[in-house]
Image (tube, helix red, strand yellow):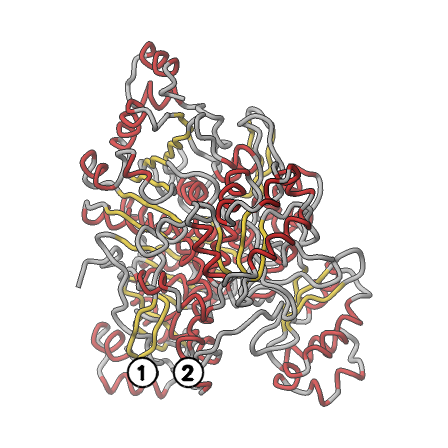
Amino acid sequence: MNKSALAGIRVADFTWVWAGPYAIMLLAYMGAEVIKIESAKRIDSSRMGSITTGQSFTGWDSSSIFNNVNLNKLGVTLDLSHPKGVELARKIVAISDVVAQNMRPGVMDRLGLGYEDLIKIRPDIIMLSSSAYGITGPFREYTGYAPHFAAFSGLAYMTGYADGEPNLFTGSTDIRSATTTAFAILAALYYRQRTGRGQHIDLSSTEALSVLIGDIIMDYTMNQRTPSRSGNQDTAVAPHNCYRCRGEDKWISIAVATDEEWAALCQVMGNPEWAKDERFSDSYHRWQNQEQLDRLIEGWTVNYGHYELMERLQAAGVAAMPSFTAEELFSDPHLREREVFTEVEHSVMGKQVVMNPPWKLSETPARIERAGPLLGEHNEYVFGELLGMPRAELARLKEEKVIY
Amino acid sequence: MSERALDGVKVVEKCSFVAGPYCGKLLADLGAEVIKIESPGTGDEARKRGPFLHDNPHPDLSGLFLYLNTNKLGITLNLSSSTGRSIFKRLIADADILIEDNPPGRMEKLGLGYESLKEINPRLVITSITPFGQTGPYRDYKAYHLNTFHASGSGYLMPIGSPTFDREPIKGPGLMGDYDAGLSAAVATMGALYWCGVSGRGQHIDVSKQEAQMALDKIEFARFHSEGKNPTRGPSAWRPHRMIQGKDGVYILLEAGRDGQWQGLVKAMGNPEWAKDEKFSTEQGRREHGDELREHLVAWASNYTADELFHMVQALGTPSAPINSVEKLLNSPHIEARQFLVEIDHPVAGKIKYPSRPYHFSHTPWSAERPAPLLGQHNEEVIGRRLGYTDEELVKLKEAGVI
């Protein structure tokens, strides 16, 4: 039998869209049993379409996005606007260790599923509430998702070309918030393992991003300086950029931090005359003259393929890696050997290529066991088997649109 | 002092710069005892990097180092020396977690690989963080933050919605990708720690910075399979987010995509006539007539500051957000109310405000208990008092370059 790090842990997952579900999926990767609670009355928007491309999906079970953030989970449906629906949700909580939600602050309380309600069901429950700004403070009622988190947190302002606009990123900012959520839940689980006590965790997605530029924040608190965008450039070293290679939209990133690495780069470039210029003679000069330096380096790189350059530069001890496309990642020999991608069978969409969990644990490997659930796919298992509900009652509740 | 979530957890951290130390910081900030090992003489690479307090490039004045290493004990140890390795082994004998970021194979060469350390302490969880992981054809490749960010595929996607392909793809802000790797490592480390509590056994965790970063954009990459082409940073026809400047020049993010959001925005604008036009009544229509829509929004927004627009739109329950510089972020009433900045007093750097935490635990709050350590600050406490080396022996160890 395969061991799992979180075997025996059960999560009642009330989250939706990206940031919440991905966090709980990380726990599911490590073997927690996750019951995702949805409703046909309130369809998770990631089942409906993509918020980044505008694409719509047919039906509720054909979304590769939903699949990608809900792998390994069991799915049930409950109409929480119906008192019987809430009662059943409370029964799920009674058999769960963790409750996670990312509804607007106050909603779970109004449903009778707030922390104060849940500790009456299970005093050691761990509840995680994730929101844009947290559940306290002047913006606690405010809403947002990935691009808003990137905007408010300071990340967007700091991203982009030096002479360009701020950039809002991809949905990855939601995933960053989600990873932070998973960490917080695990810390609370550890505390409960040691003391038997649960608690409520209030997570602010915008702050979860701000801490990732903590050193930039320090420049303000120490020196009242607030930097702006600088593309690929570094505050201290050059060359430090992406350079065009042969082919269509092919690029290689090169970073040189020491004189040794600079000499190695020069050697690979064939020791061109320009490289001996005073302007590039040491780290300080290279940083000062990096714009000219970048143009000269690109005059060289543009003649070669990016994989070829990667190999030649790495062999010489220079830090260089292509700016990979998705296609290149899927066919990359390193990622193949590390089994970074896998296939999972989805009963509607067929075989789906997905990324494996990003950690390799030697004793309790994290793994993908199943595709994301179809809407209400595990109603029979959860209500019937786990909660012991007779078939007739289950059928009746479906008819009454409570299990719906 | 309140109880903390990770009280009693013992961590040894042998890492430099950002990724490993951030993983250690996440644990230290929640109460784990983290003993940070630095090389004698120069210490952690981050000490050499700014921002420096008042631009003074002193190893105890690096804002990067101070932020990443608050709440840790600091010792110096040279693992190239056999005495250094003996001391190291004694430290991990007692530890729950070791976080290390040596190039793959180095620890094994020193006789400190997982198989060896497991013999000494079967409960030990070892988290190894490297650019490309412990295995594979790129495992020995050299990579700085810029390189792993681009190797992850995230760089190619940015800046998202770029008007052309003429310019290079770019990385994220600062050293964010390295923080991402540390955070990802912390998740797996906690999972393993939990399992150790159940099973009594440790394990080895292999974290690749490239993979940690890739995971963050896995949804984008999946588009290659579902759409049959690469997602790119190129012009995108669909732009529901409108980045528009307020009268103070600060950008605000407005939503005009989904119908519910559009209706909220229209109300916030006071139901102007132009918004009633048939062409703007559907999501499709707002996309097709995007340029015209934008012109109207620009005209409206030019009457208000970004913050005024933020509050006006949020009052209707519709998402919006100002694009904050760090200065603007830190001066917001939200940051104040959440007590996001905490003042810590450091023996050399003095009193400075640091970012604290994004999560509030009801029973085990985050806290700053000690400032970042000076180089070797806790040698006497950890190597001397706890391991039993006398003051004379410590001096000899120092002279021999062991500590």
Q: Is residue B93 left or right of residue A167?
A: left
The chain letter for the residue carrying disc 2 is B
**Which residue is depicted at the point 24% across and 73% down?**
B387
Q: Position of residue B380 (x, y in %)?
A: 25, 80
Choose top left, top right, bottom left or bottom right for residue B228.
top right
Disc marking residue A14: none
Q: Which residue is mark 2?
A: B53
Front residue of A183 and A116: A116
Q: Secondary structure at mark 1?
A: strand
Front residue of B364 and B389: B364
Q: Is residue B390 above or below residue B184?
A: below
**Which residue is depicted at the point 71% across and 87% down?**
A279
Q: Which residue is mark 1?
A: B350
Q: Position of residue B268 (x, y in %)?
A: 48, 48
Alpha-carbon neighbours of circle 1 within 10 Å: few (<14), some, or many (≥20)? few
User: Contact, CB < 8 Å: mark 1 with mark 2?
Assistant: yes
Q: Amino acid at mark 1?
A: Gly
Quadrant (top left, top right, bottom left, bottom right) of the C terminus of chain A: top left
**Upstream in the sequence, badge 1 or badge 2?**
2
Q: Is residue A251 above or below residue A341?
A: below
Q: Position of residue A131 (x, y in %)?
A: 39, 48
Front residue of B248 and B177: B248
Q: Secondary structure at mark 2?
A: helix
Q: Is residue B113 left or right of residue B396?
A: right
Q: Is residue A333 left or right of residue B261?
A: right
Q: Position of residue B186 (x, y in %)?
A: 39, 56
